[in-house]
Image (cartoon, rainbow, N blue to C red):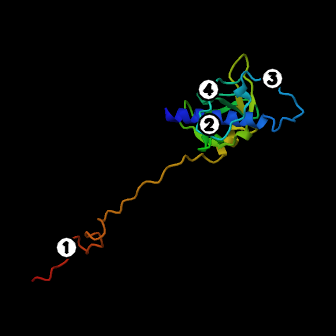
């Protein structure tokens, strides 16, 4: 559940950053806006957090939900399917760094994952009202030759097997027994 939430946040952040990048930087911009916003808050760029929630009222036509984005087909240079999006790599600020593409395999078995920056892809509209697809200028062979994507594994705690300092945790004598007491 949290994975889906994080993916949703990442997609939302991507779409918000794209919308902000397209917003005019000053009121003296010579280009008129394409359409009037539905509400006054829709035209206001996101402000730094001041403790108030910044609600998004609806999805726009150029925005994707993570639930629909995962599984998006990836096409190669020859317009043939070469894989699909299996995950999204983003940081805590919501910046998307890569789309993880699953390549090869059969029904997910034996598939390889490679990660590519979002700018590597072009969005191609689906045919007959089908979902949009992502297109790469690479072939399936090039992707299968690419380095595998390595998921982060947090370091595991190490245990030394010796007890706490001062409680016999130092080196043990050879033979595993106790040190001789000097009694004969």
**Real-space Cα separation, disc 2 to disc 3, in angstroms:** 26 Å
**Real-space Cα separation, disc 1 to disc 2, in angstroms:** 59 Å
Q: Nearer the viewer, residue 168 or 9?
A: 9
**Real-space Cα separation, disc 4 to disc 2, in angstroms:** 13 Å
Upstream in sequence: badge 4 or badge 2: 2
Badge 4: few (under 14), some or many (20 or more) residues near its Cα, within 10 Å?
few
Q: Residue at x 15, y 80 (%)?
A: 181
On the image, numbered disc 4 is attached to which residue? 68
**Real-space Cα separation, disc 3 to disc 1, in angstroms:** 85 Å
Q: Nearer the viewer, residue 118 or 91?
A: 91
**Real-space Cα separation, disc 4 to disc 1, in angstroms:** 66 Å
Q: Is residue 112 left or right of residue 157?
A: right
Considering the numbered disc 4 on the image, is that residue within a helix, a strand or a loop?
Answer: helix
Q: Residue at x 63, y 29 (%)?
A: 69
Q: Is residue 26 left or right of residue 155?
A: right
Visible residue check, residue 24? yes
Upstream in sequence: badge 3 or badge 4: 3
Residue 29, position as x, y percentages in the image: 87, 35
Decide: is 158 above or below 143. Answer: below
Q: Which mark is residue 35?
A: 3
Q: Tell us which disc is closer to us: 4 or 2.
A: 2
On the image, numbered disc 2 is attached to which residue? 10
Residue 24, position as x, y percentages in the image: 81, 35
Upstream in sequence: badge 4 or badge 1: 4
Asked if disc 3 and disc 1 are in contact, CB closer than 8 Å, the reply is no
Upstream in sequence: badge 2 or badge 3: 2
């Amino acid at each position: 559940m949290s994975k889906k939430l994080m993916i949703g946040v990442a997609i939302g952040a991507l779409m918000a950053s794209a919308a902000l990048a397209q917003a005019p930087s000053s009121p003296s911009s010579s280009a008129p806006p394409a359409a009037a916003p539905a509400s006054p808050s829709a035209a206001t760029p996101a402000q730094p957090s001041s403790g108030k929630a910044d609600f998004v009222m609806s999805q726009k036509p150029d925005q994707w939900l993570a639930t629909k984005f995962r599984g998006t087909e990836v096409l190669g240079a020859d317009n043939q399917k070469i894989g699909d999006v299996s995950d999204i790599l983003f940081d805590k600020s919501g910046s998307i760094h890569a789309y993880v593409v699953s390549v090869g395999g059969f029904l997910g078995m034996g598939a390889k994952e490679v990660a590519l920056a979002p700018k590597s892809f072009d969005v191609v509209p689906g045919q007959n009202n089908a979902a949009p697809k992502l297109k790469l200028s690479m072939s399936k062979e090039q992707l299968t030759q690419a380095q595998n994507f390595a998921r982060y594994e947090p370091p595991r705690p190490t245990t030394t097997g010796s007890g706490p300092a001062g409680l016999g945790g130092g080196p043990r004598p050879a033979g595993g027994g106790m040190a001789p007491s000097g009694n004969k």
